[in-house]
Amino acid sequence: MAKARTYYFCQECGYQSSSWLGRCPECGKWNTFVEEMVKSAAPAAKTATTVAKATPKRIQEVTYGETKRIPTHCNEFDRVLGGGIVPGSLLLLGGEPGIGKSTLLLQTALAIHDRRLLYVSGEESEQQIKMRADRIGINTESCYVVSETVTQRIFEHVDAVQPDLLIVDSIQTVTTEDVESPAGSVSQIRQCTTEFQHYAKTTGVPVLLIGHITKDGTLAGPKVMEHIVDAVLQFEGDRNYGFRILRALKNRFGSTSEIGIFEMRGSGLAEVSNPSALLLSHRDEELSGAAVAATLEGARPMFVEVQSLVSSAVYGTPQRNANGFDTRRMNMLLAVLEKRCGFKLGAKDVFLNMAGGMRVSDPALDLAVACSILSSNVDIPVPPRYCFAAEVGLSGEVRPVSRIDNRVSEAARLGFERVFVSKYDLRNLEQNKYNIKIIGVSVIEEAFRNLFS
Ligand code: TYD
Ligand code: MG
């Protein structure tokens, strides 16, 4: 029987200390140390020796043969993963409670009908999983479910089922017998993650872990977990809207710039392959304060409608509020409009909103934001078939943005009449190649003159 000792762990970064500390010397956070019981370091050493059978090879001699990725049968999920699940990989899916993590992975498990799958849940009973599966409504014979929280038992089930893919919902609810601290503590999470990693690496069976997210938006549990896993995916979205976005924060086998877009329906998550069509409000009458931005998420064009409302401030200090857009960036744009273009916005309340509850951080939004604010200020609508794709600099200059050709061709495809871009982007665009009028501007006033006079 291994001897148990108490250690203190920083819940933020996983730093270990033999005494309690007020401030973590590793990450500098205060008040993060929690006492945990650890049964000697023996189990970790054991796993290390059993894996160490490989001999060093020259890099040219290393072959990876037919490591075929496992397709998830879901284009949006595959896109984020970089084309399917890599054998032997360990993936972590994080997200707020109720966002749809369990739904996404169960749906994926049901869709991969040509492989044997084991879905282990520490949160729900088998009946609850079955109810959810009935809601999703995919029939398959190759998906096994079990409700279990101890890793040693989980591996017994794995031995019995011999799955091609293992899903664990969630890492915060599983415990290992080697560590005595409660489920969800740093040493438990670290040890369990290491055990799943060891399983994935030695058998080649990919493991998908679900992880909770804390109030401040970081993955609960230590950062060390993010270092161990091969990919960290985040599922996010505004719960008041149906949209869910899947992003890769880290991906050893693909790009981190791709996103997957889903919509939560009554029967599970549906893929959204053409987000722009949903995000643009389909209005007939022209309203002031709305402008469409041609943004990109990864390599994928996404058109969002920027809406703003400018009104005289009733109280002394004007209110500035942005939804889905960085407030500091909005304040910067307001300062540029005030200083460089002479619009008196200092005594106005400004509210900004991205339609559809989207959160976008593409610099190409700037020009649309500026035009929407001014449109509301002068109460003249921007024609609905106009869109914008340019960054605005501090001196009011309109700057070029990346992949302008993608944005312009998508704008033409969606039926826009005019697209406003930076003059410097015109070099990369051949006007007669696109079925849309391209307007290049060099300073922000030029865009306004074009729009409002
Ligand atoms: P869930 O996957 O349980 O979230 P998480 O595992 O991230 O905590 O999904 C939770 C929400 O999704 C729940 O509030 C109900 C909703 N939902 C639907 O709208 N349609 C469905 O078909 C399913 C299965 C869930
Ligand atoms: Mg869940």
Image (cartoon, rainbow, N blue to C red):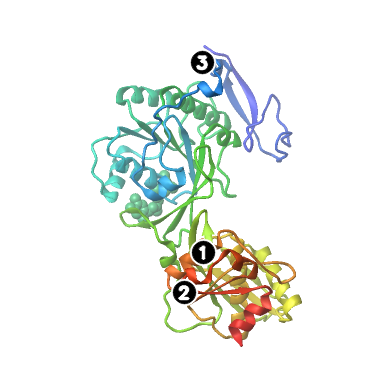
Query: Which of pointers 2 and 3 lies earlier in the amino acid sequence?
Result: 3
Mark 1 near mark 3, Cβ–Cβ under 8 Å? no
> Does residue 179 show up?
no
Q: Quadrant of residue 21?
A: top right
* Residue at 36% over, 47% down: 74
Q: Nearer the viewer, mark 2 or mark 3?
A: 2
Residue 40 in picture, x, y percent from top left: 58, 17
- The Cα atoms of the two marked residues, 1 and 3, are separated by 49 Å
Please name the amino acid that badge 2 sits on: Phe
Where ligand 2 lies, by image quadrant?
top left
Question: Does dot 1 land on a helix, a strand or a loop?
Answer: helix
| Mark identifier at residue 407 | 1
Report which residue position mark 2 lands on.
Answer: 416
User: Is 150 situated above or below 387?
Assistant: above
Q: Residue at x 34, y 22 (%)?
A: 159
Marks 2 and 3, Cα distance to the nearest angstrom? 59 Å
Q: Secondary structure at mark 2?
A: loop
At a point 26% along the width and 46% down the height, the residue shown is 138
Foreground of the two, 409 or 303? 409
- Amino acid type at circle 3 is Ala
Q: Dot 3, how many residues are within 10 Å of its Cα: few (below 14), some (14-19), or many (20+)?
A: few
Q: Which residue is mark 3?
A: 54
Q: In the rendered view, would you say 438 is above or below 191? A: below
